[in-house]
Image (cartoon, rainbow, N blue to C red):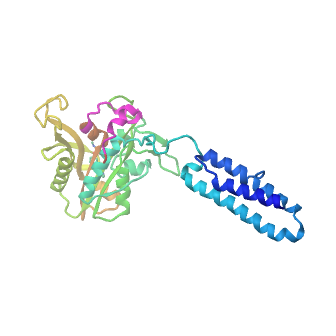
Amino acid sequence: MEQLLKQIEDIKKEITAAEAANAAALEEFRIKYLGTKGLVKQIMGEMKNVPNDQKKEFGQILNAFKIVAEEKFEALQAGLGDSAAIDTGMDFSLPGDPTPVGTRHPLNLVRNQMVSIFKRLGFAVAEGPEIEDDWHNFGAMNLPEDHPARDMQDTFYVEEKTADHSAWLLRTHTSSTQARVMESQKPPIRVICPGRVYRNETISARAHCFFHQIEGLYIDKDVSFADMKKTLLYFTKSMFGDEAKIRLRPSYFPFTEPSAEVDVSCTICNGKGCNVCKYSGWLEIMGCGMVDPNVLENCNIDPEIYSGYAFGMGVERIAQLIYQVNDLRLYSENDWRFLKQFSSETF
Ligand code: 2NL
């Protein structure tokens, strides 16, 4: 007994004096005193040799001894702080490796900017399906059954017309979404439809089998051609700067009458003449017109009460004027050398 008590006192002194400079030394301490083959367990094992009448007293001494070892371990651990967990030899205070976050796509940058201008003018945003039936894409838009745009050469068909369903196709313009809005809402309607559209074209620098459009529609009582001109001028100035001018040239679309093509004064030379505008001073940016009465009727809007204007433009075309990208294929090749050039843009 005497000997055992002395041994406990000696180990206690050792424990009290112990130090741990790092996680490895702390682990050594734990194994030596508190491990399954450690000294605390060993001494506990001596309990069986203690005479019965002394077991209670000895038990208390042993318990206190164990607590001394455990408390010391905790104190050493606390002293080492976080580094006690695992000593990896790494300096966690060093700055981390940067995480690449990607960039916004130039077409999304331009689309967002265009949408925000029209939102300021009170236009709502509507989206619709890219796979359409031929009524919403063509019929409602006043394109007759034999119109060349419906040709397989121009339109991608997903399903041919059968006895129980119309033809399904990849929409060739977002007017199909405007038709859906007109069918389901009552005037006043003031909406823009951004989205991807498809045409059966051979891919080149100047043509692609898909591109992006924003079409707009305003229907109310007494909507005039002048209202349309003022809206499109506001849009153009917001997009290209206050010095930008517009010019309307008479044109033809099956869904509007009268119709016009809209040019903006060259965004590079401001109308003086340069390579980009081929020395004409003007660049074509959109089509527009007063919504044809047939189109209103097709969508259950009474042309005797309501009138409206509509317009459409290509997002790639506007992006080309802003960024001088002259090859349409760049937009969909996902080439990082192209995309990263837009990393500083925040829109
Ligand atoms: C273009 C397209 C235009 C429209 C598009 C339209 C027509 C109706 C209803 C809703 Cl009836 N949207 N879109 C109207 C006039 C011209 O041009 O991309 N031109 C370059």
In this rendered view, identify the residue nearer to me: 184 or 292. Answer: 184
Is residue 170 toward the left or the right of residue 221 in the image?
right
Q: Quadrant of residue 108?
A: top left
**Image spot of residue 322 (x, y percent):** 24, 39
- Residue 298, compared with residue 147, is above or below; it is below
**Image spot of residue 71 (x, y percent):** 65, 60
- Residue 54, compared with residue 318, is above or below; it is below
Q: Residue 292, can we see it?
A: no
Residue that appears at 58% across and 47% down = 21
In this rendered view, identify the residue nearer to me: 26 or 323. Answer: 26
Say how many tags the image has: 0
20 part of magenta stretch: no
Q: Residue furthest left?
A: 272
Q: Residue 341, can we see it?
A: yes
Is residue 18 toward the left or the right of residue 221 in the image?
right
330 part of magenta stretch: yes
Q: Quadrant of residue 89?
A: top right
**Image spot of residue 293 (x, y percent):** 27, 56
Assign the N terminus to one quadrant of the image.
bottom right
Magenta segment:
322-345
Q: Quadrant of residue 340?
A: top left
In this rendered view, identify the residue nearer to me: 50 or 98. Answer: 50
**Image spot of residue 52 (x, y percent):** 89, 69
